[in-house]
Image (cartoon, grey):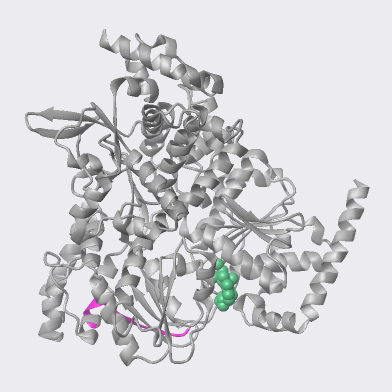
Amino acid sequence: GSIIEKVLQRKSLRMRNLQRSWQESPEGQRMLSFRKSLPAYKEKERLLAGIARNQVTVISGETGCGKTTQLPQYILESEIESGRGAFCSIICTQPRRISAMAVAERVATERGDQLGESVGYKVRLEGMKGKNTHLLFCTSGILLRRLLSDRNLNGITHVFVDEIHERGMNEDFLLIVLKDILPRRRDLRLILMSATLNAELFSNFFGGAPTVHIPGFTYPVRVHFLEDILEITGYKLTSFNQVDDYGQEKLWKTQRQLMSRKRKNQLTALVEDALSKERFENYSSRARDSLACWNSDCIGFNLIEAVLCHICRKERPGAVLVFMTGWDDISCLRDQLKAHPLLGDPNRVLLVTCHGSMATSEQKLIFERASPNIRKIVLATNMAEASITVNDIVFVVDCGKAKETTYDALNNTPCLLPSWISRASARQRRGRAGRVQPGECYHLYPRCVYDAFAEYQLPELLRTPLNSLCLQIKSLLLGTIGEFLSAALQPPEPLAVQNAVEFLKVIGALDEKENLTNLGRYLSMLPVDPKLGKMLVMGAVFRCLDPILTVVSGLSVRDPFLLPQDKKDLAGTAKSRFSAKDYSDHMALVRAYEGWKDAEREGSAYEYCWRNFLSAQTFQAIHSLRKQFNHILKDAGLLEGDLSTCNQLSHDQSLVRSIICSGLFPGIVSVVHREKSMSFKTMDDGQVLLYANSVNSRYHTIPYPWLVFSEKVKVNTVFIRDSTGVADSVLMLFGGNLVRGAAAGHLKMLDGYIDLFLEPSLADCYLKLKEELENLIQQ
Ligand code: ADP
Ligand code: MG
């Protein structure tokens, strides 16, 4: 060890020299004086001493006080300064990839370093780190993945888990695993960072770990609820039955899905109650009328526009931060605002967006200051709540919603839908306005609705399907799934765990005894949903990779087929042109993508998309995701031979459909024809409807007994989105254990077929098997 030791010591000295020369340079000095102005700096020595003394430390502090960018950096700097730089390895997790990348870049800049040198990042499918990287920002998912191959985190000296107050699933999961590692790694330091003050919960989880609070200063923020906003802006809310503009109707629709009925009734009752009370006598009759039409479902873009106009016309200078629910809404609102005479005028307004899927160049705009007489308006998701700090914000507009995965264990249906935020989130959003001077916050909902919000949001572990998580527990050899999860901060319902285990058994990732199968092992290596992972594995094994890459990428990004409210018919017809009467949205996607690629090559992608109601941006995203999935498969050792080998059978449409079925199963409904009508039944006899944009919704009959689907969404009734018609034989071959179990008598020969098919040579048997099976069924 002594030679290695010597090398590291020499490297440490180099690191110290580098650090010192940067800190002494004029630019380094300037950076240092900015960093010293952050509230975290005052606590620096106390924090360093605390972390050195205790294995676990919980740190809380206002957003923007310097937790993420400063604390890991303090450790790095002090290690380097003490000549031990090369011996330390610090990891800091972020819940979102975009913040991991943004923060790493920021810290590298603060250190006068190239990204990927002393500071790097790693997120799913992407990274910038090198042999000199000693501070790594990564998503919590990446650290979990690392634990797969390195169960003690050997070589890591410090782990920061950031934004734990969000109670993301990966963070909660990490905490269980890390708690398990600590006794085995006495030298490892764990630091938990949180924005709001519920530090005791985490401290208790780690047996009373010390907590440190970084006091921060914020200016007072004046709060306006909907009542006041209607008064101030003179805006009249339309009844949501009459809404005509795209944004309102769309938001209305999604928001219908969002609340449990109970909560919704409660909120609606509150509004009605409030309306009847005398306190509303004080408002002008106009505001009262508007409020009477107000419904907890209806928050329109027009209202946001009215508030923004008010701020631009009447208020003092200062940037505006608008909290929206997601990328879709942000881009719709942006388009609407762009068309506005005042808000769309680039000489007066700088419109910036901030969301999870934005490019790095866009990120930079967020931090840029607008020139003096231009007002900056940032449209953001709840990412701007705590992970990303925009400095010059004076006004906050809060729609009161955030996209949240909800999961109904009883119906086993997951949905990613906008829902009401918690009071803690609302306070957090409000706080964003008071960082540089006294601010104003416009909450686009009545005060009584705010009062009805939950205090904190439910932890993600309790509101999402646990499929991926359970698979990871198994592959990390963490014991029985149920037992492991019962050690969580707030353990999930047993029914949710049972559903996940059942699902993994049905798709063949776990065997009857809950052991990982070969397929399961592959799936745990792929950083995608097990369902999509299985489709990829099967696509690779059956040598029809290309179309499957497109399908999986499309399902991971979003639907490239657009459905403008006023041109639904035209858009539907355009889409059906891609379906070639084969009853498959997924195949339509494959063809549309192929068409886009050709058009792209000829430089006519724009016209192609315009003509066919397609989103060029989505195709770009699909295109790059395809490449990334390809890499993942290669890394997992699933791609042998060259491209043409992988695609030997790509032209075989019936095979491609079968592979789609293998991935989407058990997402399946039966097609029931009765007289002139057709309906769709789930396995447990529930009714579903087809989404309006599905090619299958255009037919009166479908010549397949089954449809596999990629997504089930609950509105009033349950809708299924993209679907593909499937024959009996295909379902039996590719439908997973459930169906094969039912048909066991006939299908003895196929026992354990997934394991067999993982050997590529057997792919050739597929057509023959299928033929035999079809004969069997016909007999
Ligand atoms: P916390 O994690 O406590 O919320 P951060 O460490 O993320 O705070 O940010 C501390 C400060 O650093 C912020 O208030 C902001 O002023 C500044 N900052 C962070 N990222 C950037 C960036 N990319 N560009 C400019 N300033 C930044
Ligand atoms: Mg932070």
497 left or right of 675 in image: right
**Number of numbered discs:** 0
Give the image location of residue 55, x and y in percent: 68, 55
- Between residues 198 and 761, which one lies in front from this camera angle? 761
Residue at the extreme left of the image, as rendered: 675
Can you tell which quarter of the image residue 590 is in? top left
Quadrant of the rendering where the C terminus is positioned: top left
Quadrant of the rendering where the N terminus is positioned: top right
Residue at 72% x, 69% y is 113
21 left or right of 349 in image: right
Residue at 73% x, 54% y is 157
Q: Where on the image, by quarter, is ligand 1?
A: bottom right
Visible residue check, residue 278: no
- Between residues 380 and 772, which one lies in front from this camera angle? 772
Give the image location of residue 507, x and y in percent: 42, 29
Give the image location of residue 658, x and y in percent: 38, 28
Residue 667 vs 210, above or below: the answer is above
Is residue 421 inside the magenta stretch? no
Residue at 16% x, 70% y is 294
- Between residues 572 and 506, which one lies in front from this camera angle? 572
- Between residues 603 and 296, which one lies in front from this camera angle? 603
Q: Which residues are magenta?
A: 219-228
416 left or right of 779 in image: right
Give the image location of residue 273, x and y in percent: 14, 69
